[in-house]
Amino acid sequence: MRIIEVKSPMKGMINMKKNNIIITMMIAFLLILIPAGNISAQERMTFNDEQKNVGIYMKVWSDLDNFPITPDIIAWFENWYGPNSFLKLNLCAENHTAIPLITWQPQNVPLWEIADGIHDGYIMNFLQNITNMVPDIDVLIRFAHEMEVRPQYRFSWYSWQGERDPEAYIEAWRHIVTLARQINPNIKWIWSPNRADQFSDPYYPGDEYVDYISVTMNLREDDANYTQYNDFRSYYETIGIREHLEKYGKKIFISEVGYSNPKEEEKQAYIESIFDYYLQDPLITAMIFFDENSSDNSQYKITDNPRLLEAFNEGFRRILDERK
């Protein structure tokens, strides 16, 4: 899904490598002095992947007022070196409201620079801020998602997408996860191609560096064969994504799910079909609804429509009943 891109001011970072190494050493020293919190395992708000979790992307926080029960996961997008969204972390932490999921986008930051440690100062500061702000809550991070390119794609929509040498992607991913586990092992990492198939396989970082796998399942009107996908099952299974995802042997996130359709009754039925399918699939542990309208004029938002909102809330109630 294309998100508004923020141009990075960090051009020419290669000339600052020495300074970043010094910054990294200073931060590493400070990490020894700063405790990550003394919260016991019983008091932590942990992500439970043995249950069905429902989440939603929130751009406007007041949209949460539309839900009688706050979804399990609150998700948002965050660009590297752009305005941070730590306020949302605090809101998730308030009264243990929700597990945060950050789609962390290294827009205009070369992957080889990340792998070489040039951006370690920024990375470690970002991760340490998370640790200090929410020491008692698990955090999910979806880094550099939708990285693969297929022959039918007209263009790449992210700077990291379609990296000619997948090793750069893999090394950048492994470098970040290695740093993160030294700072906060309670951050969970979601590897999230656009689709799961032979085009995404070369970018897989390896089982030990990935906690969960996921795909984007937003369906819009200009998708090929759009009319044949009249429910979630037909879309998820027909193009072979489910079968390929399950080969990884990990619990699965549907990290973005939405249906852009101007016909309200069809959109409602599709939302209902998402919950129907979710309840019977044992490997999907999180279903994250994309409650935003995109720059390409795809209309996914549901919180501005009472009928669609009720379909979501009723589906979530079914999930909660299943947990009892």
Image (tube, grey):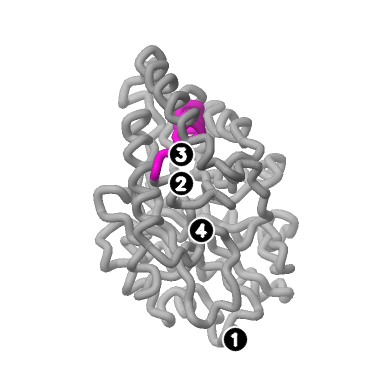
If you read the primary sequence from the N terminus, does the residue marked by circle 1 or circle 4 appear first? 4
Q: Amino acid at mark 3?
A: Ile
Q: Nearer the viewer, mark 3 or mark 1?
A: 3
Q: CA distance from mark 3 to mark 4?
A: 16 Å
Calculate the distance from the C-alpha at mark 3 to the C-alpha at mark 2: 5 Å
Q: CA distance from mark 1 to mark 4?
A: 31 Å
The residue beneath circle 1 is: 227
Is the residue under label 2 in contact with that under label 1 (CB below 8 Å)?
Answer: no
Magenta-tinted stretch: 116-131
Q: Depth check: 263 or 159 in front?
A: 159
Q: Is residue 258 magenta?
A: no
Q: Nearer the viewer, mark 1 or mark 4?
A: 4
Residue under numbered circle 3 = 118
Q: What residue is at 59 percent from the left and 32 percent from the top?
A: 86
Mark positioned earlier in the residue sequence (1 or 2): 2
Q: Secondary structure at mark 2?
A: helix
Mark 4 vs 2, N-terminal side: 2
Disc 3 is placed on an element classified as loop
Which secondary structure lies at badge 4?
loop
User: Which tag, 3 or 2, sits closer to the chain's start?
Assistant: 2
Assign the N terminus to one quadrant of the image: bottom right
Question: Which residue is disc 2 drawn over?
Answer: 113
Q: Nearer the viewer, mark 4 or mark 2?
A: 2
Tags 3 and 2 touching, CB below 8 Å: yes
Q: Which residue type does callout 2 highlight?
A: Glu
